[in-house]
Structure formats: structure tokens, C-alpha cells
Amino acid sequence: MKPTIYDVAREAGVSIATVSKVLNKSGRISDKTREKVGRVMEELNYQPSLVASALTSRRTGTIGLMIPDIANPFFAETARGIEDYAQEQGSDLIVCSTDRSDEKAARYISLLLRKRVDGLIIASHTGNPELIRGMVADHVPLVLFSADIRMLEGNSVTVDDYKGGYQATEYLLSLGHRRLGVISDNLPGSRLRVEGFLDALKAAGISFDNPANMIHTSATLENGRTAAAEMLNQAQNIRPTAIFGCNDLLAIGVLKEARSAGLSIPRDLSVVGFDNTMLAEICHPSLTSIAQPLREMTEQAMLLLNESISNPASPKRKIMLMPELVIRHSTGPVPH
Amino acid sequence: MKPTIYDVAREAGVSIATVSKVLNKSGRISDKTREKVGRVMEELNYQPSLVASALTSRRTGTIGLMIPDIANPFFAETARGIEDYAQEQGSDLIVCSTDRSDEKAARYISLLLRKRVDGLIIASHTGNPELIRGMVADHVPLVLFSADIRMLEGNSVTVDDYKGGYQATEYLLSLGHRRLGVISDNLPGSRLRVEGFLDALKAAGISFDNPANMIHTSATLENGRTAAAEMLNQAQNIRPTAIFGCNDLLAIGVLKEARSAGLSIPRDLSVVGFDNTMLAEICHPSLTSIAQPLREMTEQAMLLLNESISNPASPKRKIMLMPELVIRHSTGPVPH
DNA sequence: ATGAAAGCGCTAACAA
DNA sequence: TTGTTAGCGCTTTCAT
């Protein structure tokens, strides 16, 4: 059996209260007993049970992270950022991939609550908003990440998706493109990116009149390819000369498809992504993409979460950071 | 305050034992009381504390996963695979990135033990072997993944790294290449891949006489580039015509560097990677790579782990799966 | 400076 | 079928 605090106490000839105090460096303990107890702990290779201590202290030291899919580089990078901050403060992370399934999300939320995580960060896919509302009402420390629920008084950290979509579009317009396509993910953030896209067109006095040039799907490489194939199969004078993919995975799918259709990028087609993940650097040609300031976002999220943890009734805040256009080699002047 | 089992019991007019029984579907309970209790639970939105139940039942339902870096697609895909199996059995995952730091690994191991995780999966970077040995001696349910420690009687799931290295090299030789380079990660698996590489050369009667064509580093895109730059800066008649990168990240770094040096791939240089991550498909030209059967590996790992959890003294097993060469477009005949 | 004792919210014998 | 009770391994007053 694993040694308990009782074993250490007995072996050291003190009470468990004393052992607890040296463990937590709380209360006053003479150097002599501190050393003695410390020595016994080493001898016994004592590993204090954090589950027992969580039961009394009401802190588990773990935070829950819900994301659509850890295998998507954007979310993997998100997880990494959050883990780093968590680790600094001695917390750890339970990572849950929802696959955008509301049902899975609900199950995971329930699990995390029963595990008594100190707080939750929910990224992109929130699942049933009523669940979120309920948690906020219950003062569960919570931060929505890279997604927000309108009219919800809760913490969130997002990038200005609307602006990002606007910027991407403006840039393509500045290159002379007039027939644009957009492939969007069906997450809340993506909708805003599309709004930005449409408004940028409107502001330039360009009407978006070909519904085939807008496709909603979920973010995988394959879906990006399929969507691109549909768009590019249209007649030359109708199909887009530039496509805005609402995230890098979709955009890279477009790249792949375009190439296998014999198009040269950016000569025949320009492509812009969103997220600026490591993939944008890896694909060829490298991908022009709207960057989310991920490191800063994760930091802000942890700050908000910590605030909520130390004071669950603290006022909620919504933090929106600015996206940035990173120009690489997948975009160029419109073909004539 | 969150409702406890006592609140439910009082409200339903039964004892806590009864509530516990309906909670765990154990013992015999009349339909009537089961319903009654169930109703009260809903009314109170009762979330049974898994930390309390873990204290008594000695099962936390969480397993610890230690990997070098969750932001590396290979490990993200690993994590995802393990999460899927864990979720099926109602467990969850604490994910820890060690950054290949022995110190971080030691801290995380200790943390996971104190958290009383049901078991651990440690991938690629094990940290100080003595710690692992100690855990095995203590019957901590443990599986080494994609890495093994020689002479350690513990569970492990690996791919045959040696054979993978051999295969990659044989393939390059079959294309006519004679001057090969290798860039290896400094993880145990990579060493075996290099051994395979060297033995394949030896078997073909080719001496590996230019030490500059072997570089050890850690797996990042940037390191791959740097290493490639060093190799390719050598005189034409010395520098390799093909490079084996011991994982996809390194290999893609080579791709990038070669291209920016004006080389065309695979005309001027062939490149083979290892892991066959999603990146191999994304980069251009797409990367020939040695595939690890990741899905099967994660499944085997979970099976072993579950065995060890249900019987910590059960005999240990080492499972080695076979790699597979996936040919794409980064390899071709030797230039003449 | 140290210890006794009362929980924390469950599970699991054992009784009834 | 249901309830009583004794832990699980800690933290935290409150005494001493």
C-alpha cells in the first residue's frame, strides 16, 4: 500500500497535523521537526494524495479544456499554450475533444463538473448554449475561447473574426480580384468571418451574386478539397479567382485541389486561410493567412479563468484581440 | 453550495446508501425508490463528486499521458487516439508536454502519481529511466509508447524503428542513391531508426564515410532546415542525393531548405520522413514517409494499460508493430 | 510549536 | 430492499 500521512506521522513520531503543515509550509514548525518529517517522507517515498486533499480543500488543481479536436493543429497549439500557463501555477489539464458533437460536449461538461475541475475553457464549439448559461448562472469558473455566445454574460477571449474576414477580403480585392469564393466552417467564429467577407465586398461595391461560391462545411482538409472542386468546376467566367478559406485546413484543401486540377497558385488562383497555424508555413506555396494572436489569447484566457476561480462571482469580461494578415505565397494579382 | 449525496437522501427520504446504490446501479433497489431518487437528483441538478468517490473506490477514472509536445502533430494524433479509447470506457486524459526535459518529466510523473491517475502512458521521452524503473517496481500501471527502455520489464508499444529505418534506406538505395544523409531526433526510437539506416547501407556494401551526413538534433521544422543547410552546403560530389529525416517535421524542414536553395525535389534531392503524419500529405511535394500504425498502437496501449490497471502485478508485455513505407512525391531516381 | 478531532462526500460491509 | 456505520487521506480550527 502507498504510504499515507498517518504512516509518515507515526514514523516521524509526530501528529498528522504536523505532517500536513510541513507539507503545505503552513503554520509554524520548528526546523528540527520539519527536517525530521522531510526525511521520513523521502524514506517512505511519500506521495501525498491530491484526491484526498482536493476533497477537503475544494481545489483539484486541474482545469478542463474542451476543444473540437486535439488533432487539429490550431487546437493543439491552443492546448499547448494553455498547458504552459497552467503548469506555471501548478495546475494540469484534462483535454476533451468534442468532435463538434453537442452530445459529446454535454457528456464532457458533466464529467468535468463531477471531477470538480477548478475551471473550464471551452473552445470554438460550445455545444448547447443552455448548458453554458446554466454553468454561468451557477458561477462555474468558465472562459469561452475563440468563440462567444451573444447575449451571454460570461468570460470570453476571441479574435475579431469579423475584422479578420474583412481584412482577408480587402486584401484580395486590392490584388484586383472581383469574383471571390468563401468556404466556411460551421462554427460561430466562422460565421462572423463570412460576415466580414460579405461586408468587405459590399463596401467595395461588389455584389456577391453566385451562391455556388459560398460553401459551409466542417474543417477538414478533405472538405476543403471537395468544396474547392465544386467551385472550380464552374465555367471560367463564373468561378472565383480567389478563395477565402475560413481556416487553414480548408484553405490548404483548396490548395491541394487546385493543384491537382492543374491550376498554378497564385497565378491562376489566390487562396487565403485563417488561423496562421504551423501548416501555413509547411504547405506549398506557403499560405497567406489571418493570424490569431494565440499566445496572447491563451494568456488572457488563463488570467480570466484564474480571476473567476478566485472569485466566482467576479464581473465577467469579454476580450477581443486583433487579427493580423500574414502575407505569404498563395496570393497574387488577379489573372487577366 | 453544490448538493451532496446527503441533500439528495434527505430530499428523497432515504439513506445515503440507497442514493449511492441508485447512482452506481449496484445492489437491489425497488423501481419506486429508484425513480424517486432519480427525480430528486434532477431537481437538485446533483453532480456526484468523483473526487469523493475516487477517495473511497481508489479509482479516479483518469489516465495520464506524457508526450514531448502536444503541438507536434504526431503526438496530437497519438493523444487523440488514446482519448477516443479512454472515452469509450468513461475515462479521461490529463495531457502533459515534457518538452524533452527530464526535469519536467520528473515533475509531471510526480504530479500524476499524486493525482492518483489510474495509469500512465509515456510516449517517446521517458525522462530518467530510474523513475520508470521505480514505478514498475511499485506496480504502477504503465505503458511506454513509441519508445522503450531496454532491459526494463515493463509494458511497451512500439513500432519496429530499426526496420523502419532499414526500409526507408533500402528504398532510397533501390532508386539508385548512394550518398545518403540522415537527420535524427535525439529520442530513443530515432537511434534505432539510424541503426536501421546504417545496417541497410552496410548490407548493400556501401560505406557511410562522411560524418557530416549524419546530424542529431531535436524534432522541429527549423532544426530540419538548419541540418539540411549544413549537409547541402557541401561540395556537389560529397553532399547527399537523398536524406532520411527521422520524423516528418525534420524531413519537411529539409524540403523547405532544399527548395529555398534552389533544388527541385525529387529531381535534385530525395527526402523520406517517418511517422506519416497529416503533414506528409500537406507539404509539397507530398512526403514519402514511414508510417506508424498509430490507431492500432493506441489501441494496444490502452489494452495493455487496462490489463495493468485491473491487475497491477500482471505479466508485462512488449508489443512491436510493423512500419510501412508510404511512397509519395518527395522521392525519385538519383540524379546523374 | 504541536496535537486532537471534526469534517470533506462518497463506497462498501454488514445489519436489519 | 433499505439503513447504519466505518473508513478513504487529507485540511483546518481550536486547544494545549
Image: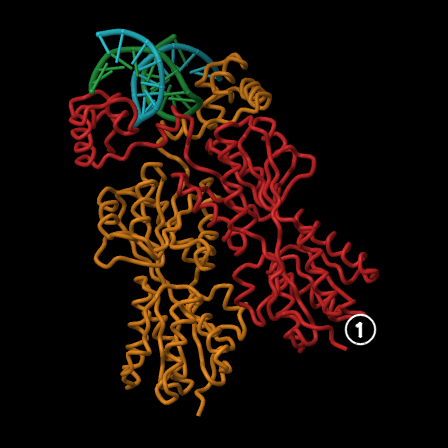
Chain colours: A red, B orange, C green, D cyan
Relative to A182, A79 lies left or right: left
Quadrant location of the N terminus of chain A?
top left
Q: Residue B273, percent across and down?
A: 43, 71
Say if residue A251 shows up in the picture: yes
Q: Spot the residue most to the bottom.
A: B336
Work out whether residue A334 or residue B303 is closer to the camera in this orientation and state it: A334
Relative to A263, B221 lies left or right: left
Q: Which residue is mark 1?
A: A235
Q: Residue A214, percent across and down?
A: 75, 59
Say which residue appears at 34% left-offset and 69% top-offset: B184
Where, by quadrant of the figure, is residue B69 drawn?
Answer: bottom left
In the displayed structure, would residue B149 be above or below residue A297? below
Subunit of mark 1?
A
Where, by quadrant of the figure, is residue A10 drawn?
Answer: top left
Say which residue appears at 29% left-offset and 32% top-offset: A48
Label 1 sits on a secondary structure element that is loop
Amino acid type, mark 1: Ala
Say which residue appears at 27% left-offset and 29% top-offset: A23
Quadrant location of the C terminus of chain A?
bottom right
Say if residue B324 shows up in the picture: no
Q: Residue B45, percent across and down?
A: 57, 24
In the displayed structure, would residue B70 be above or below residue B326? above
Q: Residue B185, percent across and down?
A: 35, 65
Work out whether residue A181 or residue B193 is closer to the camera in this orientation and state it: A181
Say which residue appears at 24% left-offset and 53% top-offset: B129
